[in-house]
């Protein structure tokens, strides 16, 4: 079935708390199975041992959208304040009052959010309401997301004609897209100044025929590696680890002995490691500048790779010169103090 896009909201009150409980964190199948064996069986069939999940209270509009929903459809979460923080792909759906009540309780009328859907992939994004309106061909101020809804088919087609996929559209709102390297890792000087200057171009370059691929950290293998590395870092740091801070777009924070620590995590392959680490270093330096404004304690910055890259000593030297700790999971015990 062709991929489709729906929009759901978690803008205030109960919805915000639900988001923290089951979107910002993964729900394990061991928590799901005692309340809904059918939902757990469906998740196992989809190859999932844990999932981000959401639900809607039954009603004509919500039920129509939920019946339309299929695995492979994408859900764009509106978090209020004219901001979309998540794009998530549906892996399974199930109806369960008992599971929904366990996860989210009941509303003032004794109803629960039993029209449930479970995601097999979640991409953190940074999309404004204006960007989404424009992509779906809405006029300015014409549309504000409410409840659970599918935009009209022609609006979705307009988005896909322009961007090619929902993932590619979402990548436009984040920190940029990586380009695969085709040359060996450069020297320290080349990392900073690039190749030999060849003089001004004789004519402007042609516009690209297709958009850059999605950010590796937000799709496919790169997303899984990124999330696994964040999980390893969280396990090492302990309960003080937090994902994200308003106004500082990074992968995690924690406090240690009067210091405020922030980190940027990067998935890497042999082909893209230079671009990913360059990008990560730029992000963490920018985020440190933002975090230091108005913050009395010292800000400590970490650039984390999923594994040791080629020329790791070069990257450690470069980061050290910038006051950044460069590490990967096997070095966490050596590089990251937690007390």
Image (tube, helix red, strand yellow):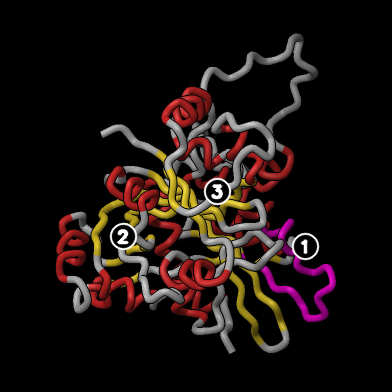
Residue 221 visible, this angle: no
* Residue contact at pointers 2 and 1, CB within 8 angstroms: no
Q: Which circle marks residue 290 in the picture?
A: 1
Q: Is residue 333 left or right of residue 27?
A: right
Name the spot of residue 136 as percent of width and height, x first: 54, 33
Dot placed on the residue nearer the N-terminal end, 2 or 3: 2
Residue at which label 2 appears: 115
Q: Residues within 10 Å of mark 1 (few under 14, many from 20)?
A: some
Q: Nearer the viewer's eye, disc 1 or disc 3? A: 3
Residue at which label 3 appears: 145
Q: Nearer the viewer's eye, disc 2 or disc 1? A: 2
Dot placed on the residue nearer the N-terminal end, 1 or 3: 3
Residue 115 position by quadrant: bottom left
Height in image: 28 above or below 209? below
Of 10 and 205, nearer the camera is 10
Name the spot of residue 131 as percent of width and height, x first: 63, 39
Height in image: 216 above or below 242? above
Residue farthest toward the top in the current orientation of the protein: 202
> Residue drawn 65% across and 31% down?
139
> Residue drawn 80% across and 18% down?
200
Residue 293 within the magenta-colored segment of the rendering? yes
Of 287 and 329, nearer the camera is 287
- The segment highlighted magenta reads 284-302
């Amino acid at each position: 079935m062709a991929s489709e896009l729906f929009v759901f909201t978690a803008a205030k009150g109960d919805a915000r708390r639900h988001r923290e409980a089951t979107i910002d964190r993964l729900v394990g199948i061991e928590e799901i199975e005692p309340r809904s064996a059918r939902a757990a069986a469906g998740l196992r069939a989809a190859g999932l041992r844990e999932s981000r999940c959401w639900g809607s209270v039954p009603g004509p509009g919500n039920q129509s959208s939920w019946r339309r929903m299929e695995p492979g459809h994408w859900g764009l979460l509106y978090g209020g304040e004219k901001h979309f923080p998540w794009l998530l792909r549906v892996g399974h759906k199930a109806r369960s009052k008992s599971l929904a009540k366990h996860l989210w309780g009941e509303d003032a009328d004794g109803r629960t959010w039993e029209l449930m859907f479970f995601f097999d992939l979640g991409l953190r994004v940074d999309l404004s309401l204006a960007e989404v309106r424009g992509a779906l061909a809405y006029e300015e101020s014409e549309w504000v997301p409410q409840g659970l809804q599918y935009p009209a088919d022609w609006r979705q087609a307009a988005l896909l004609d322009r961007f090619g996929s929902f993932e590619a559209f979402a990548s436009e709102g984040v920190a940029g897209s990586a380009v695969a390297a085709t040359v060996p890792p450069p020297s320290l000087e080349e990392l900073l100044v690039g190749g030999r200057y060849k003089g001004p171009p004789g004519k402007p370059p042609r516009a690209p025929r297709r958009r850059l691929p999605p950010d590796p950290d937000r799709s496919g293998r790169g997303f899984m590696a990124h999330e696994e590395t964040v999980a390893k870092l969280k396990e090492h740091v302990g309960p003080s680890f937090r994902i994200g801070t308003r106004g500082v777009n990074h992968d995690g924070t924690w406090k240690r002995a009067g210091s405020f620590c922030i980190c940027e995590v990067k998935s890497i392959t042999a082909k893209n490691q230079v671009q990913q680490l360059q990008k990560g270093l730029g992000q963490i330096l920018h985020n440190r500048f933002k975090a230091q404004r108005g913050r009395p304690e010292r800000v400590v910055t970490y650039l984390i790779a999923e594994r040791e890259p080629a020329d790791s000593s070069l990257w450690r030297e470069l980061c050290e010169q910038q006051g950044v700790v460069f590490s990967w999971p096997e070095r966490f015990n050596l590089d990251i103090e937690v007390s």
